[in-house]
Image: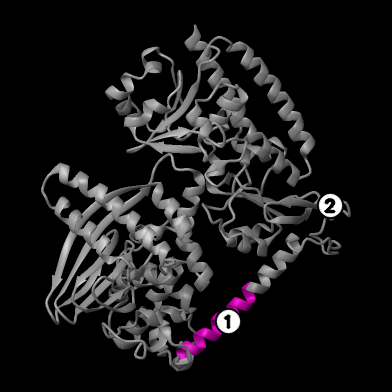
Amino acid sequence: MRLNNQIKVWNHAYIKIMDVRLMTLQRGEKLADYRFPCSVFLYMTKGQALLNLDEKSYSAGVYRLFHGGKGARLRVHAIESLQMYMVLYKAVLTSSCPSAIVELAEADNPFLFHYEFGPRYPVKLYERLVSMYAQWNSASELGSLQAKATFQQFIHELLWQLRLQEVEPESPDRVSQAIRYIHEHYREPVSLTAISFFLDCSEGHLSRLFKNKLGLSPIQYLNKLRIQTAQQLLLGSEMTLQEVAEQVGFPDAHSFSRSFKKHAACTPLAFRINGAGADNDQKLPLLISENALLKKQPLFYNDIENHFHYIKGRETYMQQRNKQVAIVMMLAWSLILSACSATGGSSGTSEAPSSGPSSTATAAEAETRTISTPRGDVVVPANPKRIVADQYMGHLLKLGIKPVGVKHIMLDEGWFDKAGVTEETLAGIEDLGDLPLDLERMTELEPDLILVSVDKELEQYEKIGTTVYVPYWEGESTVEPLEKFKRISDVFGKRDIAEQWIAEYEKKAEAAREKIKGAVKEGETVSVIQFSQNVVYVLAAKGGNYGAPTIYETLQLQPTQSALDMKDGFEAISLEVLPTYLGDHIFVYNGDKELLEESMQSNIWKLVPAVQKNQVYLYGNAYDDEFLMEDPYSLEQQLDTFTSLLLENRN
């Protein structure tokens, strides 16, 4: 993730400080193995040390800063008397965070990054850490509150210096972290949920990383490790099958024998009796060469001594053999992708249909069209049949298109019930998980067109089929809803259907504007806001979300000057300055009921003129409603809701 994107994610994060510590080690003393329980900053302020963070070694001196995410392993050996500050924190995105920011964080979470650097202006960071440490350990609530504010100043200074020095932090190797976790816990009940929780990432994301890098899932890796360990115990000990099963993480001998036979093609007893020799052992499923990462190593080492997993050309025989297997697997996978890409039409050319029985496309269906996108012209099938999408369910259904695979949340949109979308309508649509979409399942669907709303992973999608990018967000503003519907309809050559619906919608909007005349008097302004943790979001006149386009553009209610002046789709402000942003009428989106009720009990809110005149309109249902999206179905429902609210208040 580029630093500018990291800054955006930090800007939308809610931070909870877990602890601020000052660690000291005497010369020669070691911190053997410390697992980060959350995200951690380390700042060396005295001495010299050899430091190992997730198997990467550093020779660290005064004013070196380190960052690691949850699950990272830290080992320290003090060469001189050592002093360093540790800040432990958790970061989550606010509930009203724009979907574009959420997708950035899902794809590459900066709070999990591992990095180190020497700041150009170290004293500024040092001063903030000293203050934060004193405030946090003052044993007062006010001190803890002040520490949070100082942490924000620390982050601002850190990000400014990272950008100044053009440092681009990198994502940690989640696969290697997961492998270490599996090797440490394989004797226990281990699930994908437990591994993902430990590493603070989603199950789908971890599975995709595993499959992309190793060609197997985390649980498949776990099972292979258990079987290989069991093979060693069967040949090198006289343990019973039950004892072996318990040693490698199986609940009983029966389940162990069943799994063993599946992976080794023989029973555990047959394996022990036959005394599998070298040749037989070579035929067993091999663990990937990344296992070298998990062999016991000296606690600290320099680059020359960093044996096999950093310096190429020094592989053992087994590593070389594993590498050959991996190359064969990669070649096979690339052939599959190439075949899918060719059939999916990613080359943008029209090819004659196959003479095989699976080919039913007519000559007309094989024709192509060229459309314009933010990434240039794209050649698409004239009549695509198998469509995958990461967004835009309502747009597709309104155009008469049923996709074959979609992002998980698209199968449970908040407007489904009111729009009459039934289970039968959604039957047969494959759940492709969260972003990035599951590449393996997507490939199996053989899509002839992939519609995406974010440009992350575009190159991977393009290997599978023709990919069209229609952005949902432009910067931190949403694309105007009706324009967005037109763009999507153009992808499929269905502009006439979109125009017909838009004409009908505008007639309905005109009737609604006539109905609400007088509810908002001439010259009066309106505001659209949402309360969130520690901030209030004020929606802009252009590019906002949560129903703001329906209020401002469709119903043509007059925004305040501050809403007109906003460059982005929203502005995050404190409750104290909120009154200066508010108009004569206030629409409040109910994203968090408890937080909303708490905010409305404040004296600042109660003294707002619109509140005292009862010109406040609450709408929404805790992020599970028609106000999160801007598809045709949502827009129709939003229009009905706002019209009803204004009519009820007028009466």
Query: Mark 2 is on which residue type?
Result: Glu
Instruction: Please tell me how crowded label 2 is: few (under 14), some (14-19), or many (20+) other residues with Cα within 10 Å.
Output: some
What secondary structure predominates along the stretch shown in magenta? helix
Residue 635 sits above or below residue 375 on the image? above
Instruction: Please tell me how crowded label 1 is: few (under 14), some (14-19), or many (20+) other residues with Cα within 10 Å.
Output: few
Q: Is residue 462 left or right of residue 40?
A: right
Residue 243 sits above or below residue 325 on the image? above
Give the residue displayed 38% in from the left and 36% down from the top.
Answer: 573
Q: Which residues are magenta?
A: 318-333
Q: Is residue 184 left or right of residue 193?
A: left
Report x, y in % for residue 101: 48, 49
Q: Earlier in the sequence, mark 2 or mark 1?
A: 1
Task: Assess whether residue 320 is covered by the magenta stretch.
Answer: yes
Mark 1, residue position: 327
Helix, strand or loop at mark 1: helix
Mark 2, residue position: 365
Query: Mark 1 is on which residue type?
Result: Ile
Q: Is residue 191 visible?
A: no
Count of numbered circles in the view: 2
Do residues under tags 2 and 1 come within 8 Å of each other at their CB atoms?
no
Give the residue displayed 53% in from the left and 72% down from the top.
Answer: 215
Q: Is residue 311 left or right of residue 414?
A: left
Give the residue displayed 32% in from the left and 38% down from the top.
Answer: 534
Q: Is residue 242 visible?
A: yes
Helix, strand or loop at mark 2: loop
Residue 110 sits above or below residue 566 on the image? below
Report x, y in % for residue 283: 50, 86
Instruction: Tell me the tag on residue 219.
Output: none
